[in-house]
Amino acid sequence: MLADDDCLMIPYQIGDVFISHSQEETQEMLEDAKKTLQEEIDALESR
């Protein structure tokens, strides 16, 4: 087990490309993506 989780690089797919980020950055990107998708869903449901 690693003592420093920030050194663990996690691949995150954007389109056809994978970009490696720290765990914290990846979690932030996932939260932003979920928020954006939820906003799109809400907009479609309100039609």
Image (cartoon, helix red, strand yellow):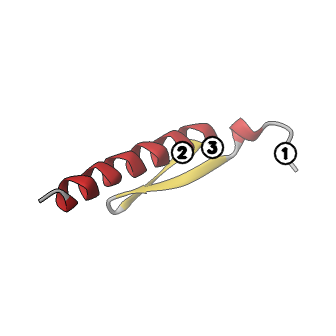
Of circles 1 and 3, the one toward us is 3
Which secondary structure lies at badge 2? helix
Q: Nearer the viewer, residue 46 or 21?
A: 46
Q: Earlier in the sequence, mark 2 or mark 1?
A: 1
Q: Nearer the viewer, residue 35 or 6?
A: 35
How many other residues sit within 10 Å of disc 3, few (<14), some (14-19) or many (≥20)? Answer: some
- Write down the residue under mark 3: 23
Of circles 2 and 1, the one toward us is 2
Q: Amino acid at mark 1?
A: Leu
Q: CA distance from mark 2 to mark 3?
A: 5 Å
At x 63%, y 47%, the residue is: 9
Identify the residue at the far left of this view: 47
Q: Earlier in the sequence, mark 1 or mark 3?
A: 1
Residue 2, labelled with which disc? 1
How many other residues sit within 10 Å of disc 2, few (<14), some (14-19) or many (≥20)? Answer: some
Which secondary structure lies at badge 3? helix
- In this picture, residue 44 sits left or right of residue 31: left
Image coordinates for residue 24, horizontal then vertical, percent: 61, 38
How many other residues sit within 10 Å of disc 1, few (<14), some (14-19) or many (≥20)? Answer: few
At x 88%, y 50%, the residue is: 1
Image coordinates for residue 22, horizontal then vertical, percent: 60, 40
Q: CA distance from mark 2 to mark 1?
A: 18 Å
At x 69%, y 45%, the residue is: 8
Q: Quadrant of the C terminus?
A: bottom left
- In this picture, residue 35 sits left or right of residue 11: left
Residue 26, labelled with which disc? 2
Q: Amino acid at mark 2?
A: Thr
Image coordinates for residue 15, horizontal then vertical, percent: 32, 59
In contact (CB < 8 Å): disc 2 and disc 3:
yes
